[in-house]
């Protein structure tokens, strides 16, 4: 199983949003979003949250997810 990182902080910064703004706009719980933003790599992520975040940032999922280790 690979390890991925979500580019939440980078994409939020590009839009001038805080993590709270992203949470409000996406419907992803703030504590979950904060965990995603702080983590250098995860093996499991809620796919529904990834879809919501990609829509919120108006990017493809591939632009939101970075493979850290395969």
Image (tube, rainbow, N blue to C red):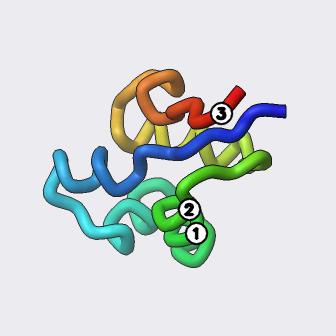
Q: Give neighbour class at mark 1: few <14, some 14-19, many 20+ (Cα, 10 Å).
A: few
Say the numbered circle drawn on residue 46: none
Front residue of 59 and 35: 35
In this image, 54 relative to 39: left or right?
left
**Circle nearer the N terminus (3, 2):** 2
Residue assigned mark 1: 35
In this image, 57 relative to 15: left or right?
right
Q: How far apart are the alpha carbons under marks 1 and 3?
A: 19 Å
Query: Looking at the image, is mark 3 or mark 2 nearer the viewer?
Result: 3
In this image, 53 relative to 35: left or right?
left
Label 1 residue SS: helix
Residue assigned mark 2: 39
Q: Give neighbour class at mark 3: few <14, some 14-19, many 20+ (Cα, 10 Å).
A: few
Residue drawn at point x = 36 percent, y = 68 percent: 19
Residue drawn at point x = 42 percent, y = 67 percent: 24
Residue assigned mark 3: 69
Q: Give neighbour class at mark 2: few <14, some 14-19, many 20+ (Cα, 10 Å).
A: few
- Quarter of the image for residue 57 reads top left
Looking at the rendered image, the quarter that the C terminus falls into is: top right
In this image, 34 relative to 63: left or right?
right
Q: How far apart are the alpha carbons under marks 3 and 2?
A: 14 Å
**Circle nearer the N terminus (1, 3):** 1
């Amino acid at each position: 199983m690979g390890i991925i990182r979500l580019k939440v902080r980078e994409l939020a910064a590009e839009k001038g949003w805080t993590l709270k703004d992203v949470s409000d706009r996406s419907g992803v719980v703030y504590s979950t979003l904060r965990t995603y933003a702080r983590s250098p790599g995860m093996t499991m992520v809620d796919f529904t949250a990834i879809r919501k975040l990609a829509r919120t940032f108006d990017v493809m999922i591939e632009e939101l997810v970075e493979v850290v280790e395969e």
